[in-house]
Image (cartoon, rainbow, N blue to C red):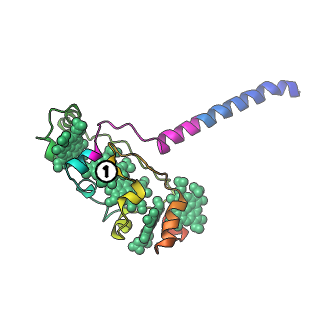
Amino acid sequence: MIKRLIPLILITLFLAGIAAVVAIAAYWYYVEADPLQPIAFNHRLHVKTVGLKCDHCHRYADRSIHAGIPAMGRCVECHRNVAVERPEVKKLMDYWNRKQPVPWGQVHVSEWHVRFTHRRHIQADVDCRVCHGYVEQMATARKVRTFHMGFCITCHRANGGQDDCLVCHK
Ligand code: HEC
Ligand code: HEC
Ligand code: HEC
Ligand code: HEC
Ligand code: HEC
């Protein structure tokens, strides 16, 4: 009896192993890894060289849940005329001419049960760098940390933010 079950057990373990690997890979791909972006946008260049402020593009940080990814019109207001010969700008203008939004990959993906809003933090003068690191040194944005609960709560307790579960969870 036991002998006959052995292949079944092995197969079950094998499938469980595969499922675990797939789950870990999917977690890495969707949650931890930075996405490959369709255009090599460069934050350093636009913030340091061109001199743009974060909220020139991420317009809603001080008034909304989301900081917002800029619509293409924001880029085209310059790139209709600026650096048009660069290959990566050509890609941008191709999307524009096809009337297709640039399919930017999402860098930060929150757990579904977490409630977060930019507005309250920006209004409380929390700097973007506290949570996102030195984006002005990056090309496309990278994630500098996973937002674990301890990271959020430690600051809330130290700075008069609330630590009630339902402030951050739905
Ligand atoms: C207190 C931490 C914190 C601060 C400060 C902060 N962010 Fe965020 N940011 C987050 C979290 C958490 C997410 C993921 C939110 C989600 O998945 O809904 C995020 C997501 C984003 C995104 C992705 C899309 C979106 O709109 O949600 C952008 C862009 C962004 N932040 C820009 C900024 C900029 C620019 C600033 C400064 C003006 C800033 N953030 C300040 C925590 C922060
Ligand atoms: C205020 C004007 C302005 C806006 C808005 C702007 N750019 Fe640029 N961008 C520039 C300038 C100026 C350069 C060339 C800088 C240099 O190389 O000296 C540039 C360069 C580039 C390049 C070429 C980089 C390289 O290394 O060849 C790309 C790609 C680019 N921008 C994409 C974008 C995208 C995408 C947006 C919108 C999210 C955007 N830009 C918004 C002014 C702007
Ligand atoms: C010229 C427009 C422009 C400016 C200025 C700009 N960004 Fe961005 N930002 C973008 C674009 C386009 C993306 C999407 C591509 C990427 O992830 O890099 C992005 C992505 C991000 C993300 C990741 C969003 C996500 O998917 O989770 C963060 C965080 C961010 N920017 C923060 C900043 C901060 C902080 C500043 C100021 C220091 C800044 N940005 C200035 C255009 C801009
Ligand atoms: C650097 C400090 C700091 C960090 C890090 C931080 N917060 Fe906050 N947060 C605050 C402060 C301060 C307030 C209160 C602002 C106010 O009272 O207007 C606040 C307010 C909030 C609110 C609004 C509460 C309300 O009454 O509407 C939410 C939701 C929130 N934080 C969630 C988060 C989450 C989720 C994280 C982690 C991803 C986080 N915070 C990280 C400082 C921080
Ligand atoms: C200041 C914001 C904040 C508060 C307050 C908060 N949480 Fe969380 N919590 C988070 C964030 C952000 C995550 C997601 C962590 C991650 O993705 O690693 C999380 C994750 C969790 C998880 C999933 C397991 C884990 O650790 O990832 C549980 C369970 C949880 N919280 C329970 C609670 C309970 C119970 C309370 C009240 C005692 C509470 N939380 C208060 C922000 C908060």
36 in magenta: yes
Q: Is residue 170 visible?
A: no
User: Where is residue 27 drawn, in percent x and y?
Assistant: 53, 42
Q: Is residue 31 visible?
A: yes
Q: Is residue 82 left or right of residue 88?
A: left
Q: What residue is drawn where x is 77% and y is 30%?
A: 9
Question: In the rendered view of the protein, which quadrant contains the N terminus?
Answer: top right
Pointer 1 residue Cβ closer than 8 Å to ligand 3: yes
**Image location (x, y in percent) of residue 62:** 31, 65
**Image-quarter location of ligand 1:** bottom left
Please say whether residue 118 is one of the residues in the magenta stretch: no
In this image, 33 relative to 19: left or right?
Answer: left
- Is residue 40 or residue 168 the one in the foreground? 40
Q: Which type of secondary structure does the marked residue at label 1 adopt?
A: helix
Q: Which residues are magenta?
A: 22-44
Which residue bears the numbered disc 1? 136
| Residue 24 image-quadrant placement | top right
Seen in the image, is 3 located left or right of residue 69?
A: right
100 and 52: which one is in front? Answer: 52
Q: Residues within 10 Å of mark 1 (few under 14, many from 20)?
A: some
Q: Give the percent coordinates (x, y) of residue 10.
A: 75, 28
Which residue, as the protein is rendered here, is positioned at the far left? 81
Residue situated furthest bottom in the rendering: 160
Q: Left or right: 129 with respect to 7?
A: left
Q: Is residue 167 above or below residue 52?
A: below
Residue type beneath disc 1: Glu
Q: Is residue 64 above or below residue 37?
A: below
Q: Residue furthest right?
A: 1
Taking the spot 33% from the left edge, 48% from the top edge, the residue there is: 137
